[in-house]
Structure formats: C-alpha cells, structure tokens
C-alpha cells in the first residue's frame, strides 16, 4: 500500500502503516519473502492490485470520524493577555493589527468562563499575544482565580523571552504552573537584535538578556522550545546559532530546538518564491536539522498509535482562544475576526465553527503521499494553502525519524513493548 514506510535497522527492516498505524519489525529473511507473510495481508501492508489507496483512506477516516464522540467540555485555552508587543519583527503576521491589553475585569471573567466550561477537568492554558508578559497581571489574576476555585491547570507560553526576569520566572513556576515556553531566536547576536528591533529596551544586548532568561527558565525546571525562523537572510547564521546554543546549553534535556521556514505554505510564498529558491531554502533547513540532531538539540518523537482525526485547536472541539476584549475564537491567527462567541455569553456561532472544520480536497500529488492518512488541511488555515514537494519530503522524514526513535525505545526497554506503551506514544 502507498502508506507503508520502510526503515532499515540492525535487526532487519521496520514497516509502519500510516493509515492502520501497524508497526512491524521484519528480519532480513522475512523481508526477502514479503509475499509469504500472512500478517502483511491481514494488516493491509499488502493489498489487492487496483485498490484506490486514496479513496480507501478517505473511507477509513470518515468511519473513524463518525464514531468519534465530540468533546463535552472546553479544556484548552489560548489566552491573549495583550495584542501589544515589545518586538517589531518584520515577519510577524500580526503587523497592522490593534494593540490592546486585557483588563483586570476581563481577566476575572475569563477565569469564570474557564471554570464554568471545563467540566471539572484539568485545563491547559496557553499564554499568547503579542507578548503575553507585557500584561503579567492578567495572567496573575486568571491563575489566582482558578486556583481559588479548585480548577486544576497547567500552562505554557509563546514569548520572545525578553521580560523573564528572576521574579517573573519564580512566579511563573509557582503560581502560573508554567511547564514550557517557546522562544524564537532568529540568529546570533547581531542578526537577532536587528530582527527583533525591541522597543523599551535596556542598554543590555537583547540577545544576551534572552539567553540569560532561557537559563533562568531551565534552572526552574521550565522546559524551553527554541524556534528558529529561517529565510535566505539568516539560513547560514542559524548554523552559528546552533553552535552557540550547544556550547551554552549542552545536555539540558528540557531544551529543544526546531526550525520553521518563513512563508513556506501561505499564499504570499506561492506567488513570490521561485521553485529554485524554495529548494535551496529547504536544503539549508535540512543541513540545519542535521546539526541540531547531531548536538542533541532536536526533539525526538514517538509514533502515534492512533490516526489523527483533527489537526489543531481550530477543529478539535475542546479549545478556544480568548482575546483581550473577551471575544472567543478558534485559531490564534484570527485575533480580530471570525469569532465564535464571548466569555459573557453562552451563545456560540455554529456556522463559524462548522467553517473551521472544513478540509481542503485532495490534490493529484496526494495520490502517492506516504503521509496522506494523517494529513488534514483546513480551508480556513492560512498556513495550509499550499503543499510543496519540500514540505511533503519533510513530513516523510519526520515519520522515518519517529520510527527509529520508537524502535530505539523498544530496544532499550525504556518502555515496555506492549499496547500500553504504544497508546502513550
């Protein structure tokens, strides 16, 4: 079947089915005699000639989706404490939007809304902006109110990291139950400082300040995910940044790094970046990823046993964004429109919710794509307007890497090789 990934390992060959999620290890002898193994037919690794794999995958996903119960409660919240920011990154998708903070009154009402709609389940909070630390008091109010109401919660944050002083880190770990922070680094000192173009800054180099704050977070057992935004202007410089991060944070298991190609799948790129430019940029990203992996900075992931039926918070049914004015949305990229409700109302806009669930139709290139069964591209997502061969190749590499990592865990007996292990992957 199209959806069978193969990966050679010392024991033989790994096979992973991205549709059925079956994961097998064949000896070299078994691999040489594939058509004599009944299990490969039973688990749909081998299928009849003429089967339309794409149509079959669509049917499987449709049936699985039909039997999936919709979430009863909202337990994930992305909260915009403010839409203002102390950085002026040239690539920010929020450029030109309004810059307003969440008032103390709205923060109290946000906590009430969460308490009344979480169904006494544990809540996951995501502090977002703008720069969420530009309005720490809103975070403080929401967390204090939730704790007082007996609501169990943990939180994460997307931040530029500049405002994480010692007092803030202590409060974040103690009161906010902050578990992880994503911080973007666009290059080494000169490139970073020029790209961020901070306002209201001190005489200290912003780059050095942020690196120091990352060290503070790690010391407080708050994990840090560094995002490297890549384009032609900084592709080579990010290799130097990788070296610096390795020198400073080597062996810190709760720090990981990943790269993201700017404008890689939106309408702007489709019209402005040539095929050759895109290929060159993704080649540079591959070199960067290899170096991150070499230094142990790239996070590794296990295989997910279950086929994904949703792609993000927008179509999950259990998540909302909360804007500074109390408006409720479904996607962090929509901070000024496409709202579905308000924290002061029990009404929801079912039409907008339905629109965010709509997926794009398959394209001719999907027919031979290994990752098609787990690829869900929403019509409303600005980052999923196009899929280029380079993006497709990156997804396939991610599957092969997850196969190797899951196999190593099994070999090392770090987790038992049974159903419970794979359910937790």
Image (cartoon, rainbow, N blue to C red):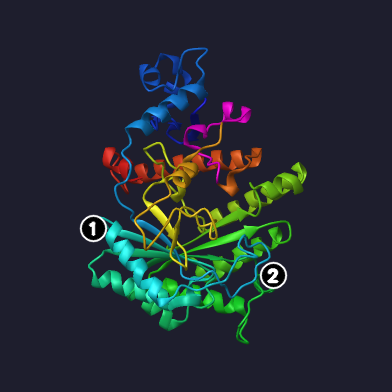
Q: Residues within 10 Å of mark 1 (few under 14, many from 20)?
A: some
Residue 361 lies in the magenta-colored region: no
Residue holding disc 2? 191
Looking at the image, residue 44 lies above or below residue 146: above
Asked if one can make out residue 1 in the rendered structure from this viewpoint, the answer is no
Q: Is residue 298 found left or right of 242 in the rendered image?
A: left
Quadrant showing the C terminus: top left
What label does residue 120 carry, if any? 1
Identify which residue is drawn at 59% across, 51% down: 290
Q: Secondary structure at mark 1?
A: loop
Q: Is residue 77 found left or right of 196 in the rendered image?
A: left
Residue lying furthest top in this view? 49
Instruction: Tell me residue 96's x, y (percent).
Output: 65, 65
Identify which residue is drawn at 59% across, 78% down: 208
Q: Secondary structure at mark 2?
A: helix
Instruction: Tell me residue 50's x, y (percent).
Output: 52, 13
Q: Residues within 10 Å of mark 2 (few under 14, many from 20)?
A: some
Q: Which residues are magenta?
A: 362-380
Asked if one can make out residue 300 in the rendered structure from this viewpoint, the answer is yes
Instruction: Tell me residue 275's x, y (percent).
Output: 75, 42
Identify which residue is drawn at 62% across, 39% down: 387
What label does residue 131 carry, if any? none
Looking at the image, residue 90 lies above or below residue 362: below
The answer to which of 375 and 139 lies nearer the viewer is 139
Instruction: Name the front one of labels 2 and 1.
Output: 1
Instruction: Tell me residue 314's x, y (percent).
Output: 46, 49
Looking at the image, residue 247 lies above or below residue 371: below
Give the Cα separation between the discs numbered 2 and 1. 46 Å
Question: In terms of image quadrants, where is residue 106?
Answer: bottom left
The answer to which of 340 and 39 lies nearer the viewer is 340
Looking at the image, residue 231 lies above or below residue 25: below
Question: In terms of image quadrants, where is residue 117?
Answer: bottom left
């Amino acid at each position: 079947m199209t959806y069978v990934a193969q990966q050679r390992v010392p024991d033989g060959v790994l096979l992973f089915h991205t549709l059925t999620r079956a994961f097998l290890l064949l000896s070299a002898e078994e691999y040489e005699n594939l058509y004599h193994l009944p299990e490969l037919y039973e688990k749909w690794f081998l299928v009849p000639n003429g089967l339309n794999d794409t149509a079959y995958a669509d049917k499987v996903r449709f049936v699985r989706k039909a039997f999936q119960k919709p979430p009863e409660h909202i337990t994930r919240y992305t909260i915009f404490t403010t839409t203002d920011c102390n950085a002026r990154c040239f690539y920010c998708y929020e450029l030109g939007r309004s810059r307003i903070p969440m008032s103390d009154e709205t923060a109290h009402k946000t906590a009430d809304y969460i308490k009344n709609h979480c169904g006494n389940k544990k809540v996951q909070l995501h502090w977002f902006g703008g720069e969420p630390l530009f309005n720490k008091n809103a975070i403080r109010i929401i967390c204090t109110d939730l704790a007082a109401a007996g609501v169990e919660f943990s939180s994460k944050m997307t931040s530029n990291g500049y405002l994480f002083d010692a007092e803030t880190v202590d409060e974040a770990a103690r009161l906010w139950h902050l578990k992880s922070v994503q911080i973007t680094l666009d290059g080494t000192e000169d490139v970073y400082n020029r790209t961020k173009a901070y306002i209201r800054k001190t005489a200290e180099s912003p780059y050095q300040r942020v690196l120091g704050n990352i060290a503070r977070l790690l010391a407080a057992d708050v994990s840090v995910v560094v995002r490297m935004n890549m384009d032609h202007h900084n592709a080579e410089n990010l290799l130097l940044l990788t070296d610096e991060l390795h020198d400073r944070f080597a062996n810190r298991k709760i720090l990981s790094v990943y790269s993201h190609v700017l404008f890689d799948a939106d309408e702007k790129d489709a019209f402005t970046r040539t095929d050759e430019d895109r290929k060159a940029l993704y080649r540079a990203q591959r070199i960067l990823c290899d170096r991150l992996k070499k230094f142990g900075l790239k996070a590794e992931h296990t295989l997910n046993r279950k086929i994904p039926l949703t792609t993000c918070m927008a179509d999950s049914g259990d998540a909302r964004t909360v804007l500074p004015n109390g408006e409720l949305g479904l996607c962090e990229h929509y901070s000024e429109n496409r709202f579905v409700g308000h924290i002061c109302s029990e009404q929801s806009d079912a039409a907008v919710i339905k629109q965010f669930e709509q997926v794009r139709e398959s394209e001719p290139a999907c027919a031979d794509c290994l990752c098609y069964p787990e690829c869900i591209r929403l019509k409303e997502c600005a980052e999923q307007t196009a899929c280029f061969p380079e993006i497709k190749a990156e997804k396939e590499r991610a599957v092969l890497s997850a196969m190797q990592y899951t196999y190593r865990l099994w070999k090392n007996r770090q987790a038992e090789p049974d159903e419970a292990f794979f359910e937790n992957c």
